[in-house]
Amino acid sequence: MWFAPSVWHSRCRGEEESIPLFRVIKRQFGYVKTRLRGLTKNTAQLVTLFALSNVSDP
């Protein structure tokens, strides 16, 4: 399937904007490796990391 260059540019631009957000969250809180302690605990940890990231963002 062929797309116009503008379509690819807009698609890649959206992906580039979301990637640094996850890197900041991981590095700021030391979340480098996923610990498989149970799905509920992992979900709770991720929700907490995102909430703290939103609070610390001016």
Image: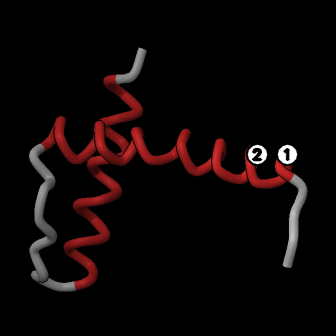
Q: Amino acid at mark 1?
A: Ser
Structural distance between the alpha carbons of marks 1 and 2: 6 Å
Q: Amino acid at mark 2?
A: Ser
Quarter of the view holding residue 23:
top left
Residue nearest the observer in this picture, 26 or 3: 3
Q: Position of residue 42 (x, y in %)?
A: 23, 72
Q: Are marks 1 and 2 in contact (CB under 8 Å)?
A: yes
Q: Which residue is mark 2?
A: 10
Residue at 18%, 35% in the rendered image: 28
Image position of 8 (left or right of 21): right
Image position of 35 (left or right of 41): left
Residue at 74%, 45% in the rendered image: 9
Tell me: residue 6, above or below residue 53.
below
Q: Which residue is mark 1?
A: 6
Task: Indicate the secondary structure of the residue bearing disc 2.
Answer: helix
Q: Position of residue 57 (x, y in %)?
A: 39, 22
Image position of 37 (left or right of 42): left
